[in-house]
Amino acid sequence: MSNTTIRVLTALVVAGGLFATSGCGGGQSTDQSAPQVASVPEGAAGGGKPSAAATSDRPVDRADMSEEERSRLWTTWGRCLTEHGVPAPPPGKQNQSQDVLQKPESAKAVAACASKQPESEWDHAKRTDPDYATKFRALIQCIRDKGVSVEPKGEGPGYSLTDDRQITRGMEVADECDRKVLR
């Protein structure tokens, strides 16, 4: 499973907390220790495509951010979505399914909030950094140098940890290597 896939799956668990903290969750509490990471595939919500300006000005979810900083980024995006009509998760659920964000009726909200949706540091680098390919290769090598089996997915930023027994260690190493390579 790639780092990006794991972060997207984490997002699905965390996204509900974002909606709950936005004032539309009916007083639900969230686990503030959980990573505040989310992602919606580009164009996932149907016809509402963000403008080029909206995608270029997105906040970046950096590996060196504190949980408080990260939480602020994702809460801002979650609040925007609920203000534009995306329903909060049902009572008792801590997550919003990605299916809700992919529904045609969510397209306008997703497009309206595109400039507030945090972008992963690697996705941002791929789009803006001419040295991205070199840095991505350095990331893969850094992970391997720390004894974790990893295979890149194309030109990245995705990759797969090829030994399921190494996933926990692989995620720790990946975060460490992210900070090292992107600085």
Image: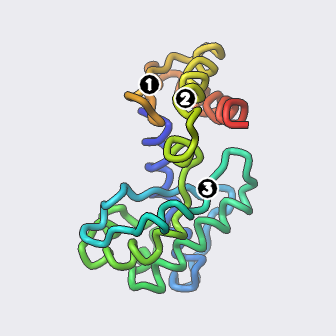
C-alpha distance separating marks 1 and 3:
22 Å
- Label 1: element kind: strand
The residue closer to the viewer here, 161 or 104, is: 104
Residue matched to label 1: 152
Question: What amino acid is found at the position of numbered circle 2 in the picture?
Answer: Phe
Q: Residue furthest front?
A: 130
Q: Position of residue 95 (x, y in %)?
A: 46, 65
Q: Are marks 1 and 2 in contact (CB under 8 Å)?
A: yes
Q: Residue at x 51, y 69 (%)?
A: 115
Q: Position of residue 57 (x, y in %)?
A: 56, 64
Mark 1 or mark 2, earlier in chain:
2
Question: What amino acid is found at the position of numbered circle 3 in the picture?
Answer: Val
Q: Are marks 1 and 3 in contact (CB under 8 Å)?
A: no
Mark 1 or mark 3, earlier in chain:
3
- Label 3: element kind: strand
Question: What amino acid is found at the position of numbered circle 1 in the picture?
Answer: Pro
> Mark 1 against mark 2, which lies toward the viewer?
2
Residue matched to label 3: 60
Q: Position of residue 173 (x, y in %)?
A: 64, 28
Give the left or right position of residue 154, taking residue 58 as reference. Answer: left
Count of marks overlaid on the render: 3
Mark 2 or mark 3, earlier in chain:
3
Residue matched to label 2: 136
Query: Mark 3: few, some, or many residues within 10 Å (few <14, many ≥20)?
Result: some
**75 over 69 or under it: above or below:** below
Q: Quadrant of residue 31?
A: bottom right
Tag of residue 111:
none
